[in-house]
C-alpha cells in the first residue's frame, strides 16, 4: 500500500480541544518542527490498540511525509520512518482476544495498509513499559505515541540512566492516546477514512476489532483523541523504568 496515490492533507482535520470548544489548526501547528526523517514510534501493547487508537494520526503523519516529497516535483518511492511496536514474544502476539500465534504478515498487514512499511518496521516486543522504552531507544525514535493507561509498576530490569539522558535529548513530541482528557483530535475523512476501514479489515480474524469497533466513529470521518505532553513529563512518568545513575 502506498497512500500517496490516494490521500492528501485535505482529508484531515486537526483540532485543539479547549474548554470553549474545538479550534481548527494546521498540520504545521501540530508539528511545528516536523522533518521527513523523524522516526515515529507507535506503541501497542495489544495489536488492535494502535490500529484503533492511532489510525487517523498515523495516516496524517504519512501524508505530511509525502507532501514534502511531492513538493520537490519529482517521482519518488519512499516510506516514512514509522515503526509499530506490538506486544508479544516468540510469534505470540497479544490481542484483545488473548495471545495468538501469528505470522509476521498477519501481525503487520493492517499497519502496512497505513503505510507503516516495510515489514522490518513491525516489531514484536514484550508488553511492558520498560521493554517498549528499550525498543524505542534502540530504534532511535524521536516521536512517540503511547497508550495513556500503559504506565509502569514494578520493574525487574530498568534501563540505564544514559538511556534516560539520550531519550531526553532526542524526543521531539509525545502523544498519549486512548485518553479521557485529550487536548488534540485528528480526524480523517474521504479517502483517508476509506483506507482506515480497509486497514481494520486486515486485522487477523482472532483480533477483537469487531467487538471494539464502537471506539471509532464510522460516520463521514474517523477521529482519534490525544493528550500531547512534553517529552520530559513523559520521561518522568516512566522514571521507574530507568536506573538513577
Image (cartoon, grey):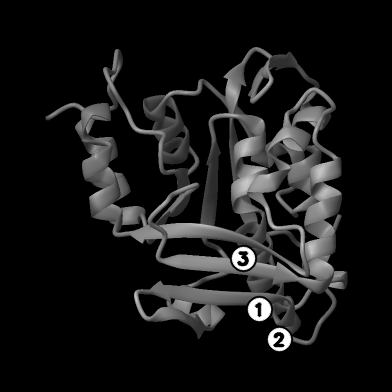
Dot 3 corresponds to which residue?
61
Q: Nearer the viewer, mark 1 or mark 3?
A: 3
Of residue 112 and residue 44, the one placed in the foreground of this image is 44
Cα gap from disc 1 to disc 2, whole angstroms: 5 Å
Which residue is under mark 2? Answer: 71
Q: Is residue 68 above or below residue 101?
A: below
Quarter of the image where one finds residue 95: top right
x 75%, y 81%: residue: 70
Q: CA distance from mark 3 to mark 2?
A: 16 Å
Residue 202 image point, x, y percent? 85, 40
Within 10 Å of disc 1 (Cα), the crowding (few <14, some 14-19, many 20+) is: few
Question: How far across and how far down the image is residue 81, in percent?
Answer: 62, 54
Instruction: Mark 3 vs mark 2: give the one in front.
Output: 3
- Picture quarter with the C terminus: top left
- Left or right of 233? Residue 9 is right
Image coordinates for residue 146, horizontal then vertical, percent:
46, 44
What residue is shown with label 1?
68
Q: Residue at x 75, y 38 (%)?
A: 119
Q: Is residue 141 visible?
A: no
Instruction: Note whether 188 is above or below 95 in the view shown.
Output: below
- Mark closer to the chain start, 1 or 3: 3
156 or 147, nearer to the observer: 147
**Dot 3 or dot 2, earlier in sequence:** 3
Quadrant position of residue 142: bottom left
**Picture residue at 78% right of the left edge, 87% below the top:** 73
| Residues at marks 1 and 3 touching, judged by CB atoms closer than 8 Å | no
Residue beneath the point at 40% across and 65% down: 183
The residue closer to the viewer here, 185 or 123, is 185
Amino acid at each position: 500500500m502506498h497512500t500517496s496515490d490516494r490521500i492528501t492533507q485535505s482529508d484531515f482535520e486537526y483540532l485543539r480541544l479547549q474548554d470553549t470548544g474545538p479550534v481548527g489548526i494546521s498540520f504545521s501547528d501540530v508539528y511545528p518542527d516536523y522533518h521527513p526523517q523523524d522516526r515515529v514510534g507507535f506503541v501497542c501493547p495489544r495489536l488492535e490498540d494502535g490500529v484503533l487508537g492511532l489510525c487517523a494520526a498515523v495516516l496524517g503523519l504519512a501524508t505530511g511525509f509525502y507532501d514534502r516529497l511531492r513538493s520537490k516535483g519529482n517521482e519518488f518511492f519512499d516510506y516514512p520512518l514509522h515503526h509499530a511496536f506490538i506486544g508479544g514474544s516468540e510469534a505470540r502476539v497479544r490481542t484483545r482476544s488473548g495471545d495468538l500465534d501469528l505470522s509476521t504478515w498477519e501481525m503487520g498487514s493492517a499497519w502496512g495498509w497505513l503505510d507503516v512499511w516495510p515489514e522490518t518496521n513491525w516489531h514484536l516486543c514484550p508488553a511492558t513499559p520498560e521493554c517498549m522504552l528499550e525498543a524505542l531507544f534502540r530504534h532511535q525514535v524521536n516521536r512517540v505515541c503511547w497508550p495513556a493507561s500503559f504506565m509502569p509498576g514494578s520493574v525487574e530490569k530498568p534501563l540505564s540512566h544514559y538511556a534516560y539522558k539520550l531519550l531526553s535529548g532526542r524526543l521531539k513530541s509525545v502523544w498519549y492516546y486512548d485518553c479521557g482528557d485529550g487536548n488534540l483530535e485528528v480526524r480523517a475523512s474521504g479517502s483517508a477514512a476509506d483506507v482506515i476501514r480497509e486497514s481494520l479489515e486486515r486485522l487477523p480474524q482472532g483480533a477483537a476489532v469487531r467487538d471494539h469497533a464502537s471506539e471509532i466513529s464510522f460516520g463521514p470521518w474517523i477521529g482519534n483523541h490525544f493528550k500531547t505532553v512534553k517529552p520530559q513529563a513523559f520521561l518522568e512518568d516512566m522514571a521507574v523504568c530507568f536506573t538513577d545513575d
